[in-house]
Image (cartoon, rainbow, N blue to C red):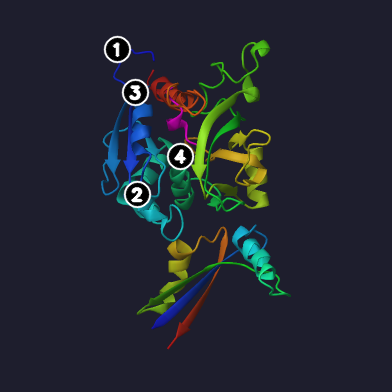
Amino acid sequence: MRRSLAPQMKFGVLQFPGSCDEVDALHAARRVGDAELIWHAERDLHGADAVVVPGGFSYGDYLRAGAIARFAPAMESVIDFAHAGGLVLGICNGFQVLCEAHLLPGALLPNANLRFTSRQVHLDVVRPDTPFTRACASRPHAGASSDSGEDDGPSQRLSIPAKHSWGRYYADEPTLDELERSGQVVLRYAPGENFNGSLRDIAGVSNEAGNVFGLMPHPEHAVDALTGGDGSTDGLQIFESMRLTVEGARA
Amino acid sequence: MRARVLIRPKAGILDPQGAAVERALPALGFAGVANVHVGRLIELDVDDPSQLDSMCERLLANPLVEDYEIQVSE
């Protein structure tokens, strides 16, 4: 990763009782910047430039996934941070938490097949111009056809793992139409990849302002060729996009 | 006062749990079963039952995807 003399951007990664992907998220964030964990009981976001709400089973997923985490003291600060325009990324359980907090539209329901599924998925980047995906447009991916030259726009595809049992994206039809119209559908499962029954193949959505983004698959698990499911490091593009956004805003 | 809150998936939303139970019953020989839906039951003692609606809206149910029904016994 590029380094400059300016201070690195800092990610704050929330940690709830029952989180399990916060260390991977921390590790992924440190590939592009500085990062530290923020315990759920804290209200101080440690001066973070961007917040990651990680995957796992916050508060045991009791009642509904994300329902109780949404009221954590740290989340109250994250809600204020988001309303002030700060970048907030929710991954898997973090996506569920952001929906429960009404920072993102819709809800995540049990997978249509009722099974916990862990697999590599291919995602189409519908919007390669958001604060969370802007690095996708410029970086070729091993899975893209080699004769297509430079990847452009929606043809860009990410290969990253997904692992969940509550990942079926749902919003009512008028809301879905509005999300499509306003360009808030950022990622879709590629054809044949929608294993959880998400409506309109939606894998990731943003809020209307574009500074809050949630997705069910796990970019933080695809940042190292040694351990990425198929050797993919595509997940780094999400973190790199956030770095570009934060550092671009500073310049 | 004792209260029960019944929570069920909103009509029209795919309910794979209900569908699985609906398929399982005939397999055990129970015929004539239709429209099975699986929800949750929350029982609680409350001093002020007038707060139950707000409890449901804010925490107990997700009104986007679930309907709730409050039953209070004196």
Q: Give the residue drawn at x 26%, y 36%.
A: A46
Query: For mark 1, what is the residue?
Result: A5
Identify which residue is drawn at 42% across, 89% down. Answer: B74
- Read off the chain for label 4: A
- The amino acid type of the residue labelled 3 equals Gly
How far is the residue under mark 2 from the one under mark 1? 37 Å
Residue A45 visible in image = no
- Give the residue furthest to the front: B28
- Answer whether labels 3 and 2 touch (C-beta < 8 Å): no
Whether residue A90 is visible: yes
Which residue is under mark 3? A33
Residue A18 is marked as: 2
Q: Main secondary structure of the magenta part?
A: loop
Task: State whether discs 3 and 2 lie on one chain.
Answer: yes
Magenta stretch: give its range.
A216-224
Q: Quadrant of the N terminus of chain B?
A: bottom left
Same chain for marks 4 and 1? yes
Q: Give whichever of A36, A57 is nearer the camera.
A: A57
- Crowding near the residue tagged with mark 1, few <14, some 14–19, many ≥20 C-alpha atoms within 10 Å: few
